[in-house]
Amino acid sequence: MMSSIQFQNDLERLLAIMPQKVVDNLSCERLDDVIEIVLDIGRVPEVRHAGGKIEKLNCEVVNDEDINFITSHLQEFTHDNRSGIPGTLHRISAIRNRQGKVVGLTCRIGRVVTGTIACIKDFCTQGKSILFLGPPGVGKTTKLREISRLVADELGKRVVIVDTSNEIAGDGDVPHPAVGSARRMQVAQPELQKDIMIEAVENHTPEVIVVDEIGTEPEAQAARTIAERGVMLIATAHGNCLESLIKNPTLSDLVGGIQSVTLGDDEAKRRASQKTVLEREKQPTFDIVIEILDRNTLAVYKNTSEAVDYILRGWPIRPEIRKVEQKVEEYKPVVEVKPEPKAPEDNKMNFSFSRQKYVEEVKPLKKLYLYAVSRTIVEKLIERLNLNVEIIRNVEDADICIAHKNFAKGGAKILNTAKDYRVQIFYVKTNSMAQIQKVLKDALDIQPGDVEALTGYTDEAEQALDEARDAIKKVQDGAGMMELEPRPTHIRKLQHELIEQYNLESSSIGEGDSRRIRIIKK
């Protein structure tokens, strides 16, 4: 973990309520990366580290006296079997037997970690509602805590935290200093969270509401009510990724909900899809969705509406990957370096083009991973098109991945890893230069005009595909039949593949140098 991140753990207060045999095996230094201390009757105590490692302590098994010693130092457990140490962020959860007796304890260590939102600070200051997704233990609550302090203290907004299990602002009547000047409303029972959310809006005039773990349909409806009243909402929800949230019937309303729509014949052909499709039902509750891939890596969907629409239609969507860098104070959000618009009198037509400026500023360096695709051909294309692309060996660090379709069948392990890290994958059907160039341009979102400006050269295959697209549109608009210009065999093959995607019929006619493609409706 980076040296600039500060930890305020109050570990001494947690160790003070532990049995002596546990304390003898632990120290504050040893607990630096520990997430939980687990004690179950009849078993040896164990500590669970952030990396997933589980370590059993070298002491006797836990007995009734050990459990009673800890619970005697705690406030009474709430309905969700949770308690805490006043003034700290530590949480103690109980496991009971059928008679209600406590037979196990999970002591979760609460930490104040500063610097974890440095890479998304620009989003947090835009006034838009943000939803965090991710598996347990990746720091969702930690980020809510720091955002609460940022918005309340640095932006001076009225912030109310709806703290269901006192995880965000700690146990006790006084909120933990980690949330700054944000106010906190405690929730007596988890099922009352939705009511407290609405009460916060009606009674305390907040500009921002922070909620941890929206997990039920009534809570999702309460979140929509808050957003529709113009209040900024910062929350987490059950779900590892945006796609899983869309498929969750209970919580899909957070991102607009989904509905089944029957398309007409013409529209289905235009989309090249089935007649019955899924579409977004309404405007999402949250403007921005952030997936927490790990403690230092975030995938940001800056436009929730667009992201949901793309996922439902099966189109490729590229979240913006942001990482907590080693020197967080040096992070500069894009919004801070956006150039000021020129005054109208200075806005004259200028046809000069700076290749170096285009490469360095307009097209930042992209990291590319290849799977069963010719590296030699890709390197030639990068050089010929003067692309600012680096081919790398580790898929985890890649921005995009290009894979051979024939080798991707059966769920290749490396491609599953790419999906886990939200690396956008593009497929080629053959290892030909024309096919790889086409996919490479799609992956990098390069328009024909961009390549002309860079190289002064328009590829024949690109011209042929553009010609085919124009002809396809005319056939769809009722032209009946269109013939393309004569092309070499390998380029006609690309045109056939493109035409097939639009559910049109194509055939090659003519001989020799006059061989060309004819397009008709099926």
Image: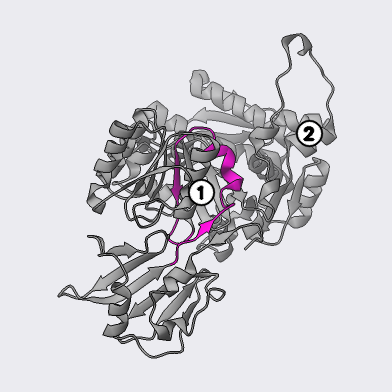
Q: Give the colour scheme of this rendering.
A: one colour
Q: Residue at x 24, y 41 (%)?
A: 195
What range of the chain is rendered magenta? 109-138
Instruction: Kindly indicate the quadrant of the structure image that contains residue 448.
Output: top right
Q: Where residue 93 sits in the image (x, y, percent)?
A: 32, 67
Q: Residue furthest top?
A: 345
Q: Residue at x 79, y 51 (%)?
A: 379
At label 2, which amino acid type do we have? Tyr
Q: Is residue 316 left or right of residue 257?
A: right
Name the residue that disc number 2 marks: 358
Instruction: Kindly indicate the quadrant of the structure image that contains residue 447.
Output: top right
The reply to whether the magenta stretch includes residue 120 is: yes
Among the two numbered marks 1 and 2 on one chain, the one whose residue lies closer to the N terminus = 1
Q: Where residue 61 sits in the image (x, y, percent)?
A: 35, 88
Closest to the camera, between mark 1 and mark 2, is 1
Instruction: Report the number of numbered marks.
Output: 2
Q: Is residue 399 left or right of residue 173?
A: right
Name the residue that disc number 1 marks: 146
Q: Is residue 263 above or below residue 384?
A: above
Quadrant of the drawing holding the N terminus: bottom right
In front: 301, or 477? Answer: 301
Q: Where residue 398 sits in the image (x, y, percent)?
A: 65, 54
In front: 390, or 203? Answer: 203
- Of helix, strand and loop, which one carries label 1? helix
